[in-house]
Image (cartoon, rainbow, N blue to C red):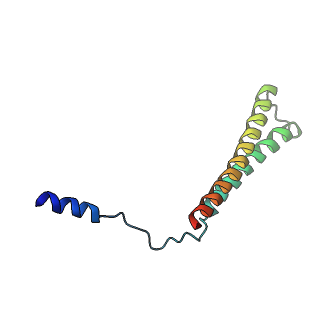
Amino acid sequence: MNDETTSEEEKKIEPPVRQDYKVEEKPSWKNRRRVIFWCLIFCMLVWVWILSSPIWGVIIAEKIAETALTMSGFLAGSVIGSYVFGATYCDVGMAKARK
């Protein structure tokens, strides 16, 4: 009898469901956008610093400047690509959840 009650109790246990979450609501992208914008601002500051350093009389090695510009460009491109992919993935997931 003990085994039967245990199996019945296990069947009755369900994971808790969040009552405050609605499928119709889109998730907040506020914090995600904040991180994305700060990353892009950082990339722009790197470009401005490297490209305007001769004006201020700061000497930067050519290879270091080239590498910094290239890597900040790759970072900005990957952030923008990830943002678009993430937004699309989220929209498709929300559309599937509504059906």
User: Please, which residue is most extreme toward the bottom here?
Assistant: 20
Q: Residue at x 82, y 31 (%)?
A: 59
Spot occupied by residue 26 in the image (x, y as percentages of width and height)? 61, 67
Write down the quadrant of residue 87 in the picture.
Answer: bottom right
Q: Residue at x 33, y 64 (%)?
A: 14
Q: How many marks?
A: 0
Farthest left residue in view = 1
Q: Quadrant of the N terminus?
A: bottom left
Q: Residue at x 17, y 63 (%)?
A: 5
Front one among 91 and 86: 91
**Quadrant position of residue 66:** top right
Task: Say left or right for 97 vs 39.
Answer: left
Figure quadrant of the C terminus: bottom right
> Residue most toward the right?
55
Image quadrant assignment for residue 24: bottom right
Relative height, residue 65 to residue 32 (above, below): above
Which residue is at the front of the view, 28 or 55?
Answer: 28
| Residue 60, image x, y percentages | 80, 31
Left or right of 54, for residue 3: left
Q: Position of residue 40 (x, y in %)?
A: 73, 50
Q: Residue 85 or 34: which is nearer the viewer?
A: 85
Q: Position of residue 34 (x, y in %)?
A: 66, 58
Q: Residue at x 21, y 59 (%)?
A: 7
